[in-house]
Amino acid sequence: AQTVTQSQPEMSVQEAETVTLSCTYDTSESDYYLFWYKQPPSRQMILVIRQEAYKQQNATENRFSVNFQKAAKSFSLKISDSQLGDAAMYFCAYHWPGTYKYIFGTGTRLKVLA
Amino acid sequence: GAGVSQSPSNKVTEKGKDVELRCDPISGHTALYWYRQRLGQGLEFLIYFQGNSAPDKSGLPSDRFSAERTGESVSTLTIQRTQQEDSAVYLCASSSHETSGRAPGELFFGEGSRLTVL
């Protein structure tokens, strides 16, 4: 069964520093999509970044990038030059190919220290 | 509206009462999801609507939970005879894409409805 694991319930980072949030997943599929969503205190989740499994190049969106290691089934999120506005819950999600189902991890709460 | 709208934002109710939560998706979005988010936990799938197709209700935890959607418009999630374990944030998300396709569309979330059952 597909599962998504985020082993870090909480992380802290100093403003302007870099932090990496980890995510591992389990699947027998070869082509699928992975996502990172951010949930700030307002509760509205927004998409941060998306990765397609057959693309070997790691996705990048401004200060956000991923380290996608398909063989290890690892999909970590790196936030560079952390800002106070990055403080939020971050959820890793796996899209079950051929279905409409997304499997979400339990989230990592990121604190940014001034 | 510009985004997914949910109401009420917060609801406090007494055990045994019925509650109705509303989701207004982005106009034109055919796919609509309801998720439950308990404190400190991930998102638990409840139900999925896609256009006029039969919804996937496989995630509804009990027959006290039901949801309706008329066409591609507003959806309501109803919880009857609420229990304390129903306390959670209920999130609604919509998408413009056929999300069972090869390239799943982005999910657009509302701010959720926080339900507290006393």
Image: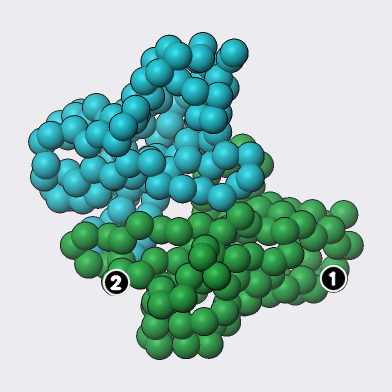
Camera-side residue of A58 and B2: B2
Give the residue displayed 45% in from the left and 20% down from the top: A82
Q: Name the residue under label 1.
A: B17
Q: Is residue A67 visible?
A: yes
Q: Chain B's shade in the image? A: green
Q: Which amino acid does label 2 sit on?
A: Glu
Q: Position of residue B106 (x, y in %)?
A: 35, 57
Q: Is residue B51 above or below residue A105?
A: below
Q: Where is residue A55 in the image (x, y as percent from the top left)?
A: 11, 42
Q: Mark 2 points at which residue?
A: B98
**Which label belongs to residue B25?**
none
- Quick one: SS at disc 1? loop
Chain letter for the residue marked with disc 2 in the picture: B
Q: Which amino acid does label 1 sit on?
A: Lys
Camera-side residue of B1 and A109: B1
Instruction: Report the side of B82 relative to A62 (left or right).
Output: right
Give the residue displayed 38% in from the left and 41% down from the top: A48
Q: Chain A's shade in the image? A: cyan
